[in-house]
Image (tube, rainbow, N blue to C red):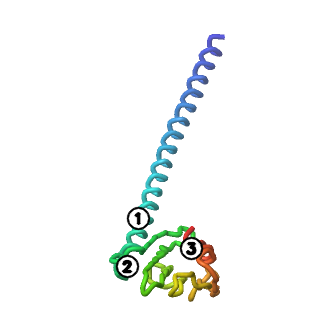
């Protein structure tokens, strides 16, 4: 009887040791996974920041920082593994307002153009004088409004 009690105590101690070892290993694995996720998140944030900086650099190189009404947005599309830059400008001359947007990739390839202007009386010209997007499939799509342009380029800015 005494041997059975000793055997049960040893078995219980071994079971406790196995559980403790499992929990310690699981805790270490969880900590490692959290660290890897943090590193991946930091890398993704850095890639997005680099893309935003590249958009700002292009905006400045184009001379659009000197005039009011210019905009830029850099977005790194993880699914396409590519940085896209949407550069916009707005200006007025001789009573006519002009608005343009161009979507570039990091190498400078143009994926979309939008251009609109009002007539000399200030009324909106319709449709835009240019509105075209290269779709992810490679097909060219003509558009008829800024809203449609933004919808079409949305595939790149997701």
Q: Secondary structure at mark 2?
A: helix
Q: Secondary structure at mark 3?
A: loop
Q: Position of residue 116 (x, y in %)?
A: 54, 83
Residue in the picture at 58% in, 85% down = 125
Residue in the picture at 48% in, 81% down = 97
Circle 3 or circle 2, nearest the eye = 2
Describe residue 7's horizontal placement relative to residue 77 as left or right: right
Instruction: Report the residue that reaches farthest toward the front.
Output: 121
Q: Are marks 3 and 1 in contact (CB under 8 Å)?
A: no
Q: Are marks 3 and 2 in contact (CB under 8 Å)?
A: no
Rounded to the nearest angstrom, the CA distance separating label 3 from label 2 is: 22 Å
Look at the picture and state if 18 lies above or below 5.
below
Q: Toward which corner of the image does residue 126 lie, by quadrant?
A: bottom right
Describe residue 90's horizontal placement relative to residue 4 as left or right: left
- Residue in the foreground of this view, choosing between 129 and 80: 129
Describe residue 59's horizontal placement relative to residue 152 as left or right: left
- Residue in the foreground of this view, choosing between 77 and 153: 153
Circle on res. 49: 1
Q: Toward which corner of the image does residue 151 lie, by quadrant?
A: bottom right
Near mark 2 (Cα within 10 A), the count class, few <14, some 14-19 or many ≥20, is some
Residue in the picture at 38% in, 70% down = 53
Residue that label 3 marks: 156
Q: Position of residue 44 (x, y in %)?
A: 46, 61
Circle on res. 110: none
Rounded to the nearest angstrom, the CA distance separating label 1 from label 2 is: 20 Å
Residue that label 2 marks: 64
Rounded to the nearest angstrom, the CA distance separating label 3 from label 1 is: 17 Å
Residue in the picture at 60% in, 23% down = 12
N-terminal label among 1 and 2: 1
If the image is split into quadrants, where does the N terminus sit?
A: top right
């Amino acid at each position: 009887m005494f041997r059975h009690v000793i055997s049960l105590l040893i078995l219980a101690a071994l079971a406790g040791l196995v559980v403790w070892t499992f929990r310690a290993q699981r805790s270490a694995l969880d900590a490692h996974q959290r660290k890897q996720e943090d590193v991946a998140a930091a890398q993704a944030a850095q890639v997005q920041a680099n893309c935003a900086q590249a958009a700002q650099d292009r905006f400045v190189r184009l001379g659009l920082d000197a005039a009011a009404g210019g905009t830029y947005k850099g977005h790194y599309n993880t699914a396409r593994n590519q940085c896209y830059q949407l550069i916009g400008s707005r200006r007025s001359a001789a009573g006519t307002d002009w608005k343009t947007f161009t979507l570039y990739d990091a190498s400078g390839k143009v994926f979309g153009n939008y251009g609109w202007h009002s007539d000399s009386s200030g009324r909106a010209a319709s449709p835009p004088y240019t509105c075209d997007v290269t779709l992810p499939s490679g097909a060219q799509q003509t558009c008829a409004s800024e809203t449609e342009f933004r919808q079409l380029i949305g595939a790149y800015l997701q």
